[in-house]
Amino acid sequence: MKKCEVYMAFKIPTPPASSEQSPESLFRDLRNRTVEGLLSQQADMLRAYVANQGEPDLALELPTGSGKTLVGLLIAEWRRRKFQERCVFLCPTRQLVHQVVAQAHEKYGIEATGFVGSQRGYPESDKSRFLTGDTIAVTTYSSLFNTNPFFRDVQTLIFDDAHSAENYVTSFWSLNIKRFESPVVFESVWSALEKHMPYYDRTRYDYRDDPQLDTVFVNKLPTPALLTIKDNLISLLDEQLSADQGELYFKWIMIRDHLLACHLYYSAHSILIRPLTPPTKSFDPFLQAKQRIYMSATLGEGGDLERIFGREKIHRIPAPEGWDKQGIGRRFIVFPMAFTSERQSLSQALKWAKKFGRALILTPSNPASEQVANLASETEAVQRFKVFNATDIETSKKEFVDTDNALAILANRYDGIDFLGDECRYLILNGLPESTNLQERFFVSRLGSAVLFCNRLKTRVTQAIGRCTRSSTDYALVLITGDKLHEFFYKIENRRCLHPEAQAEIIFGIEQSKGASFSLLEENIDLFIAHGKEWDAADAAIIGLRDSLEQSPLPASNELASSVKYEVRYQDCLWNEDYSGALNASKDALSHLSGNDLRGYRALWLYLCGNASFMAGSPSDLDAARESYRSAASAAERLPWLRSLTRFFPEAHFSPVYDPTISEQVESIEFLFEKFGRSNSRKIEKYFNEIRQGLSGKDADHFEAAQVSLGKLLGLLADNSSKQGGPDPWWFIGNTGIVFEDYTDTEENAVIPKRKVLQANGHPNFLQEKLPGVTFAPVFCSRALFVDDAARPHLGSLCFIHADSLTQWAEKAMSVIRELWVNFPGTGNLDWRNYAATKISEEGISYTNVFSFLTSTKIQDISS
């Protein structure tokens, strides 16, 4: 019998589908979807997109919970089918990649493939399907923004959660050297910077264990100084980073040849080198896409989206009509810090997790997350709860959702993590999501430019409170802890910039928390959980309040929106060493930056204008740089950092309107206030009491510690020595200081010995070696009023202060500082700095008053 031969049939390709008229009509043809239909706001947004589909940069605003993921996937699927384009949907994190792919398959019937991790691990079949346009790629921002991206020839890029993308995009052009991750590199770079640092910055290196240093202390190496060390820095980093060719190396090569187009910031724990805005025009995989779509819960005001992505202009499609008032779901927001401390609030908040079974806890940093986790381990009510971190839910949140007793403690994850319905109905926000990188921190704390980041802060807070309310019928308890976050919500001017629904929920929550107690608050929480008639009445009150409220625009948003295209152009010119173009762009930006709210930001741009001239390098350019730096220092007299630029032109005469050293003193007081917070007076009163008790007691160590604390409270640079025979505490600012010799563990009838007098007179010599530019006056501090005859020939001009007089004077000083703290509105406020400078001068605690008081009496006078 003849054997039959079997032939494989050819696969006959079918013409690509191109009949889809719109993403909306395409949705109706998706037969494998489980969602019945588009929500009205989704349909409205898709129609608006089709009307603007020719825009190369297009932003879509869809508020939290309104279904922007489906909108983005439908646009990508439509362009993939209709135009045969390769489309990439980008997410901030891997967890969101997995979440979007799951939604595409299980809910929408859209073909999407996730790409996470190293591209070497991408399956060949997945890569082939993407390259042939058979699937949408879903991946992270870092998969696009890297030195060798797989997604280099793409027609459509869709950026999800674009409002939170700043760090993800700019990190591609940022070298962030962390002290505890790369200690050798950090120390080498720090050593190269040290001679260009102010003395007090150099001492920060010794305080490596202070967890607050990276939240308060930050400084910037001025560009003229960066130019001075440029070649040395390049050689150093080439040598340090080329050996292992790890992540830092690849970051370094992106900026190595453009170092002068970057800025160098440093704190005690990290050094950051990065450009002002990301130079995305230099990156072909981003630039050559036909269309870049930015999806955001808020489009931002003042050109924030353009600064994040380095684009001069992004066309915006605002949220559909009706979303200006109504929000998604319902939050009961409570503020236990209205009546108790932060730690007690957080401790009780953790106990209430038993009512819900699961709780999501969001913090601004990893150290803050660790502190919460440690407190949870000490809290009996939740000791048996399973604790999840960001890595645990990176691939899927299923295990957390399926665990009856669980805490998810996440750092700096204010958007993207969505919990619907019973998945999680309890959210604890612990801390304000501010200043996520050193540049942002520097602009806020040293240059009075917080206005630039108001939109980002507003967006992060809005996103944070919405993590557990993802549908119109959803509800969740939101508990607020942390001084700065509590203060943010309590300030009327901050609330007015939020959506009316959020404003109403916050106002309602504040009213319930005023004068309450844990037991009273718990009764309300139980009523909220029961969702009975009592809560229905409360909900109706929130809705009524919402309808009476309006959302206010952020300050200076129009001016910032007008200047942004020139700001981006400045960075692009600088990147290409077009200093003339950068100079013109900075002047154009400055022409739009007027008004009181923008004094600090205008001063920054005068400085950047000076940098462009300085780097051009001709004699006339240097003259122009000198004038720009002079103008920068004059534009915001209360910003001491700008005054430091005068050292690059020692022959120039910078005439300050105000005493610049008083401005430094005020800035230091402000940094201390940041640590205290403004939600209640417990921290500052504790600080006062420690000073009071230390100065009034006879324990020498406690007295000296109190002196150091008092000096810092006054805005002076204060320190102490533990060396044998070394000086007791010293205070200084600028080039003037005093150094104490304390003899306080004695009575008034005691005799001051010769050795103590000799030690006191020798202290300035000790400090001369440590601080060569500062002149110190020695001050003997004691309760003793008699001097040994052997000491008399050595008294000289030694000053004297009675310990009790110092204590009494400190009490008056603390009352002035308390008043400054009560009126403190937040970091970098130039109006408050003017008020504070006037106040400390009028009340006699400016640095000149302090040093005059401490040196007004000579020891000769009390011993004669």
Image: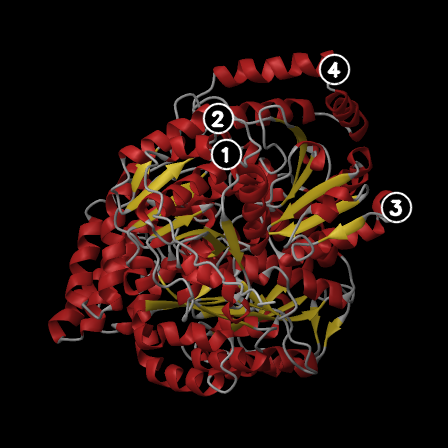
Cα–Cα gap, marks 2 and 3: 45 Å
Cα–Cα gap, marks 3 and 1: 39 Å
Q: Classify the position of the N terminus by image quarter.
A: bottom right
Q: Earlier in the sequence, mark 2 or mark 3?
A: 2
**Residue 39 - label:** 2
Of 351 and 810, which appears nearest the observer? 351
Amino acid identity at mark 2: Leu
- Residue at 54 percent of width and 52 percent of height: 97
Cα–Cα gap, marks 4 and 3: 30 Å
Q: Which residue is mark 3?
A: 380
Amino acid identity at mark 3: Glu
Cα–Cα gap, marks 2 and 4: 28 Å
**Residue 532 - label:** 4
- Mark 4 secondary-structure assignment: loop
Q: Which residue is mark 1?
A: 67
The residue at the far left in this view is 620
Residue 463 placement (x, y as % from top left): 53, 39
Of 425 and 277, which appears nearest the observer? 425
Mark 1–mark 2 CB contact (< 8 Å):
yes
Cα–Cα gap, marks 4 and 1: 29 Å
- Residue at 71 percent of width and 49 percent of height: 689
Q: How busy is the neighbourhood of tag 3: few (under 14 within 10 Å), some, or many (20 plus)?
A: few
Mark 3–mark 1 CB contact (< 8 Å):
no
